[in-house]
Amino acid sequence: MAKKKTDPSAAYKKVNVNAHIEGAGIMVDQKITETLEKNYMPYAMSVIVSRALPEIDGFKPSHRKLLYTMYKMGLLTGAKTKSANIVGSTMRLNPHGDGPIYETMVRMSRGYEALLHPYVDSKGNFGKAYSRDMAYAASRYTEAKLDPICAELFRDIDKDTVDFVPNYDNSTTEPMLLPASFPTVLVNSNVGIAVSMASSICSFNLKEVCETTIGLLKDPQFDVSQTLKGPDFAGGGLIVHNQSELEKIYRTGRGSVKVRGRYTYDKQNNCVEITEIPPTTTVEAIMDKIVDLIKQAKIREISDMRDETDLSGLKLTIDLKRGVDPDKLMTKLYRMTPLEDSYSCNFNILIGGMPRVMGVYEILNEWTAFRTECVKRRIYFDLNKKKKQLHLLKGLGKILLDIDKAIRIVRETEEESEVVANLMIGFGIDEVQAEYVAEIKLRHLNREYILKRTQETEQLEKDIAEMEEILADSRKIKKIIIGELQDVIKKYAQPRKSLFVYPGDEDEKVEEEEVPDYPVNLFLTEEGYFKKITPQSLRMSSEQKLKEGDKVAAHVESTNTAELLFFSDRCQVYKTRACDFDDAKASVLGEYIPAKLGFDEGEKVLGMVVTTDYKGQVLFFFQNGKVAKVPLSAYETKTRRKKLTGAYSDKSPVVALFAAPEDGEYVITSSATRKLLFHTSMIALKTTKNTQGVQVMTLKKNHFVTGVEPFDENAFANPHRYRTRTLPAAGAIVREEDLGEQLML
């Protein structure tokens, strides 16, 4: 049973306005699932079905309401009018405020340049799709009308081609869909975010879409890729061709397309001029990213940069320093800035009020079914109209037999209400025909007029027979649709704006030559502090600054382009490069690796491996006496991954790890004061990173490995005592003369 509680607040007692409202001030316990179902689900469905997702005609409700209002205002053929007038009239269908309505019109306008084929012919400042800061003017300053291509959207809309529904206050009606004569859903891009789902439809070239639709109408097994080359964006750009990804989009409706900006090099002024950018970014976002890269010293080739966009279009000018290769710089900018970006496709469309993710094949088949229904309804409308006309003319033909009789019947009828009935009796015609005859003007009651009207009967009968044949034959319906698509191609086709580039090997390579290469000394302390010091700086001051109790664990001489692998105590390895660290001095503490590389909380550095070619091997010495030998190439990745899990076995703690170019001898010390000298060639190389290794040193119960170090010939008086030729081995008790400083332990 639900518990009911009455609000006892004084404010509620004083104010009696709510006293007459049933349930006011009462709280009812309710399950969260019931609340979501009753309150949230209707909202979610409303957003999905009535706001965010486009339908098969290519429009969301807000688009459709605006365009239909402009059509009813006569703006398809008339002169432009103030945008404020359009916005105000649209509010009869869309009562969500003038701001959203005007913004919808802006995005569909020619001036905004977001659509391949704009629906609104605009005048004034409508902003730009490629600019974040270029705002559009207020609706009272701008003017607009429908673009000529909208004639294809409203073709025969007054012939019952689509259903109409009442508007929000039942004062007028609006179309549920627009009877577009070409697949607008694929010709212009459309993006929407609903609740729990989204839609992102890229635009395709109108000619290619229409030709593809014609191909599918003629042959359901038609290969779409023969005519549909790929997306075509209003802002142009270069599409990195990937046939397998395109085929995936055509089949499933999901995938991504890489788009690059287009540029030219002005040799005279030594500058790069970018004139086209991807549709997912803006000029300001690109400039901000380039500025950040310059501040981080990751780009040093640019001397100046400015936005020179004007009435002629987009232009971002980048001045180069002397001797800079513009193509190499642009390749670098493609990799590091939004100048190359991916357009994610998610063709989620409402079909019969239900969202569905479809590929190009399925979308065009659904559009064909929709358009077929529109054409049938148009023909059926015309057929009924001609049948009614034929019916009237047949009645008129009977009057031809005796015009004088018709005049006499009308003249001799005493009451006007009986004229139609007397004509019906006199000539054997029905009420509709008699009404038509009765309404004929006196001047038309001559043989010539009646003969001309009755001669139309034969043509009407032919037209009716032809229409009935079309309705009965699906092939003839398809032929009509194909003819309309061919007309659209002739009237509105335009060349592709987005061209294709075919990626080469150079696109996959990371430009190592851009990183300055010079010798460096790399230091890692036991506490996890790292320093990169040049030889010159080290010669000037070699005394290392360390935290109290800390000491240098590793010192490697390498180059600035070397790869660094930091192994942690949680079986993970973090990869980076020496060039990612700033040059330091011995007098500084260094960079804390766990913080720099984003270690997990409480994770510590176990060791460091430095390599330039991933040749050699890594040796892991475990506390249980096992040793694993893993090729360094096992940690090499084609992409620049920052973190690898399962870097080594977690069955026993790691005592030490070493990177070695080749096999050598190592000394293992146990807690039982035993030492074992062995050669790593006795261990097989394992390709699996997390291998448990091979048992090298046998340990008695409660004993473990305490330390490992590379063999030094001067470390033992008699090294043969500790060397083994078979594995596993227990090692030998350390003699006093071999303990050295270890006697202090």
Image (cartoon, rainbow, N blue to C red):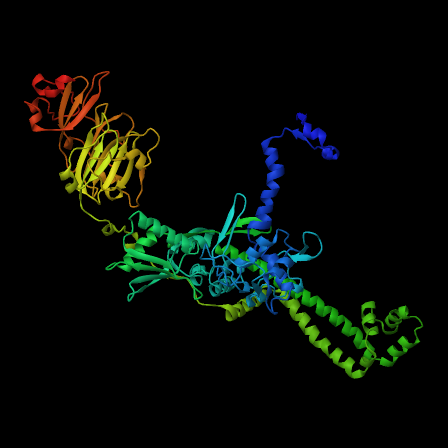
Residue at position x 15%, y 31% in the image: 680
Instruction: Judge by depth and name the residue closer to the eye, 586 or 5.
Output: 586
Q: Pick the quarter of the image with the N terminus.
A: top right
| Residue 223 in sight in this render | no
Residue 390: x and y in percent read 74, 72
Residue 100: x and y in percent read 57, 53
Residue at position x 52%, y 50% in the image: 192
Residue 71: x and y in percent read 62, 64
Residue 630: x and y in percent read 22, 35
Instruction: Judge by depth and name the residue closer to the eye, 213 or 166.
Output: 166
Residue 397: which quarter of the image?
bottom right
The relative height of residue 115 versus residue 509 in the rendered view (above or below) is below
266 left or right of 218? left
| Residue 209 in sight in this render | yes
Instruction: Judge by depth and name the residue closer to the eye, 241 or 99.
Output: 99
Residue occupying the far right of the picture:
414
Residue 685: which quarter of the image?
top left
Residue at position x 68%, y 57% in the image: 173
Residue 420: which quarter of the image?
bottom right
